[in-house]
Amino acid sequence: MPDTTPRTSLDARYSDPAATATDWAEAERLLAAAELFWISTVRPDGRPHVTPLPAVWSRGALHFCTGPEERKARNLAANPRVVLTTGSNTWDRGYDVVVEGEAVRVTDEGRLRELAGAWEAKYGGFWHFEVREGHFHHGAGRAVVYSVAPDTVFGFGKGEPFSQTRWRFG
């Protein structure tokens, strides 16, 4: 189980003097509500790879799935370190969240069924998954599921007051 009590700090270098650190409970709320994330992985030759995907916040970690032959899965086989980002595409309003951690494969079928239910509850019936043999199955395809317990999370408040909060775990 991931450490869910982070050390919180406001980075004054990137924050308005009137800003305060965002509470971790608010960051968790934003992670749970976000529909789209961008995942950054590293290719074996060192080049970055970034792609959008849906994810589910559960038990103090972000969870995502991908086909076992997709670029991100192949990248994770060589280097499990990832960054997942979410937020808004405006510069002066909203809040962006950046999660850094290690992607760990989820294979326990009970946990996978729990996560499949969370996907469908969040995204609707299109995201209905069957669980078998340590994978999500959807139509003819199958997907591996990963959990990313955060090592460090950054929050960027955009607009007055601008702010940068950092949460460190472990």
Image (cartoon, helix red, strand yellow):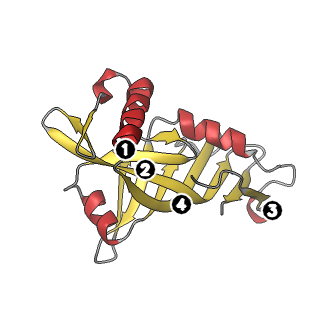
- Could you tell me residue 23's position as x and y percent? 76, 44
**With respect to residue 83, does 116 lie above or below?**
above
Q: CA distance from mark 4 to mark 3?
A: 21 Å
Whole-percent x and y of residue 79? Answer: 37, 70
Q: Earlier in the sequence, mark 1 or mark 2?
A: 2
Callouts 1 and 3 close, C-beta under 8 Å: no
Front position among marks 1 and 3 = 1
Mark linked to residue 12: 3
Three-letter code, disc 2: Trp
Q: Which residue is mark 1?
A: 53
Find residue 16 and report its image quarter: bottom right
Residue at the (73%, 61%) spot, across then down: 14
Q: Which numbered dot is residue 100?
A: 4
Q: Are marks 4 and 3 in contact (CB under 8 Å)?
A: no
| Pointer 4 or 3: first along the chain | 3
Q: What kind of element bears circle 4?
A: strand
Query: Can residue 45 be seen from the camera position used here?
Result: yes
